[in-house]
Image (cartoon, rainbow, N blue to C red):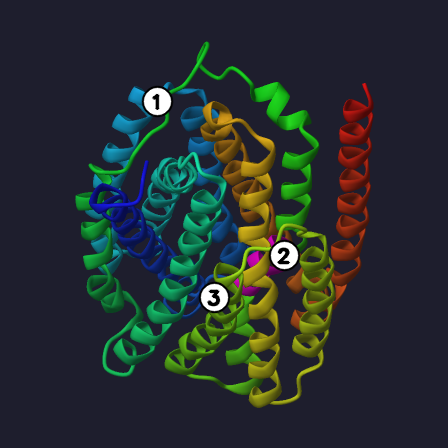
Amino acid sequence: MKPGKPFLATILIILSMTFAVRASNNMFSTTIPLLAKYNFHFDEVMVGLISAAGAAGTFLMSALVNARLRSGARRTVFIASSFVYMAVFPLFYLANSFFLWPLVIISGFVLGAIFPNIVTSASLFSDKKVRERTLSLYTLTLSISLVAGPAIESEVLKYFSLQQSFLFFSVFPVLAFLTSFFIRFPEEIGKTGAGGRDTLSNHGFRAALYTIMTYNIPFAMILTFGGIFAKEYFGASYSTITLLFSMFFLTSFLSRLMFTARTPENLWKLMVLSVAITGIGLLVLSLSTDLLIFAVSFLILGFPHGFTFPISIITITRNIEPEKRSIANSYFFSIIMLIGTVMPFASGLLVGAIGLRDAFISIIPLIFVLFLMLRLEMSRGHNERTEAAAI
């Protein structure tokens, strides 16, 4: 697609839906743990379990349904999922401790058909510079929504309850549904699901996975227990907690803004920087003695949040053919959601066993193990390319 009115309209549609889905989904992800613990009196394990239930739904849709569909059927499921998301979201206002579970699972399930197809649409431009700039704008829009969403919710929660805030945010799923009709889908070659095994064995795809895992593991824990940490140790109000998340996503936005201005050819240095900052941020968070230091840890941790996702999706587009990107993105998001399924529950058990501070410290060594696996995968990919060039 060449630059012009259709090009700009396509970009605007992608970015509008991205903003609407991510702003509402992040509000859902950060508010459900607070709602579960303080409105319905769930313990730490149950808080982790309900967050895991939503992520499990996303994983099942992305891995078992979306990845196996042809483009036409995938588009139908995508639009239907956007409608269900719009219909379910305001019902959180009416939820009780029992009704909360199916709402979380259904919302998570339909998001598994929404997220992978938006990023696939953003990666369909044939020109490499245009494609990577569009993907950078996509990730930048994610960050803008993550700054704006908590900032809006922080103001809403000054005057309304946690459950009432879902009514205010229901406008975003409506926008998502309206724009879903205009999202582009790729032409695919071969049988349904073809290329799945090749995708999973691709060194670039594996490198993208290890990159995102070095951050998504702590991020899943931050989403589930970050707000509870601030409230339990420092007595932060709901409004202050959502403002802290807005600060977190502000530094994420700034790092993605720099990424959008100049997408680097060599992503390795950013991968190293991301892991180092993640380790430092988790240490500061764990050892924080007041709300100010805790807020500083959120500012620090926002930077690698901004780097890792665009690095990962650009790594995928550089290593996966266009006709296989829907499959690759489905597997990519399903594995992210598998982490999102396991980590809230595992972190709930961990927090219950050793406490919030020690739980956050305990995941730092795991981040560096994943980094070593990433380094090994990068080396294997480089060696294979070198051997192929020599033939």
For label 2, the residue is: 215
Tell me whether the residue at label 3 lies in contact with that at label 1, contact meaning CB atoms closer than 8 angstroms. no
| SS for callout 1 | helix
Please name the residue shown 45% across and 33% down the image: 62
For label 3, the residue is: 257
- How many numbered discs sit on the rendered protein? 3
Q: Position of residue 83 (x, y in %)?
A: 21, 40
Query: Could you tell me the amino acid type at mark 2?
Result: Tyr
The residues bearing labels 3 and 1 have C-alpha atoms spaced at a distance of 32 Å
Please name the residue shown 51% across and 55% down the image: 46
Start-end of magenta stretch: 215-223
Please name the residue shown 41% across and 55% down the image: 137
Mark 3 and mark 1 lie on one chain; the one further toward the N terminus is 1
For label 1, the residue is: 71
Residue 91 colored magenta?
A: no
Query: Could you tell me the amino acid type at mark 1?
Result: Ser
Image vertical order of residue 18 relative to residue 385, above or below = below
Q: Position of residue 367 (x, y in %)?
A: 74, 56
